[in-house]
C-alpha cells in the first residue's frame, strides 16, 4: 500500500487578521500546531490542531508565530501585531 504524503509549504498557510485584536485564524490544508513567542524568544502559548488562536489577553506588541505540521516539522514562521 502506497501512502500519500501531502507536502505543505508556507505559501499554503494563511494567517489573518494582522494586526489582530482578539483572535488569529489559521487556514492550512493539514492539521497544524502553533507556537506564539515574544520577540525575545519566550513562549506565550502552544496550540495543537490550531484553527484559531486567542490573543485577546496579550499586551499590544509584535509577536512571532511558528506553525508546525503534526510531525513537528516547521512549515512557516511569521510575525503578527497585537493591537486593541
Image (cartoon, rainbow, N blue to C red):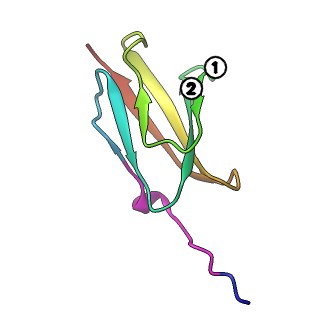
Name the spot of residue 67 as percent of width and height, x first: 55, 45
Question: Is 65 or 26 nearer to us in this picture?
Answer: 26
Q: Residue at x 59, y 19 (%)?
A: 40
Q: Quadrant of residue 71?
A: bottom right
Closer to us: 6 or 1: 1
From the image, tell me which residue sits under label 2: 37
Q: Residue at x 40, y 16 (%)?
A: 61
Q: Is residue 20 above or below residue 5?
A: above
Q: Could you say which quadrant of the image residue 2 lies in?
A: bottom right
Marks 2/1: CA–CA distance: 5 Å
The answer to whether 12 appears left or right of 45 in the picture is left
In this view, 9 is above or below 77: below
Total label count? Answer: 2
Whole-percent x, y for residue 24 in the image: 36, 34
Q: Residue furthest front?
A: 1
Relative to 13, does residue 64 appear above or below in the rendering?
Answer: above
Q: Position of residue 50 (x, y in %)?
A: 50, 41
Outermost bottom residue = 1
Question: Marks 1 and 2: in contact by CB < 8 Å?
Answer: yes
**Magenta-colored segment: predominant secondary structure:** loop
Say which of 25 and 82 sits in front: 25
Q: Which residues are magenta?
A: 4-14
**Which residue matches tag 1?**
42
Amino acid at each position: 500500500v502506497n501512502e500519500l504524503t501531502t507536502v505543505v509549504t508556507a505559501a499554503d498557510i494563511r494567517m489573518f487578521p494582522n494586526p489582530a485584536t482578539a483572535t488569529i485564524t489559521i487556514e492550512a490544508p493539514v492539521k497544524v500546531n502553533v507556537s506564539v513567542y515574544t520577540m525575545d524568544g519566550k513562549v506565550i502559548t502552544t496550540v495543537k490542531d490550531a484553527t484559531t488562536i486567542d490573543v485577546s489577553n496579550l499586551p499590544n506588541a509584535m509577536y512571532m508565530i511558528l506553525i508546525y505540521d503534526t510531525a513537528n516539522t516547521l512549515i512557516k514562521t511569521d510575525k503578527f501585531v497585537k493591537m486593541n
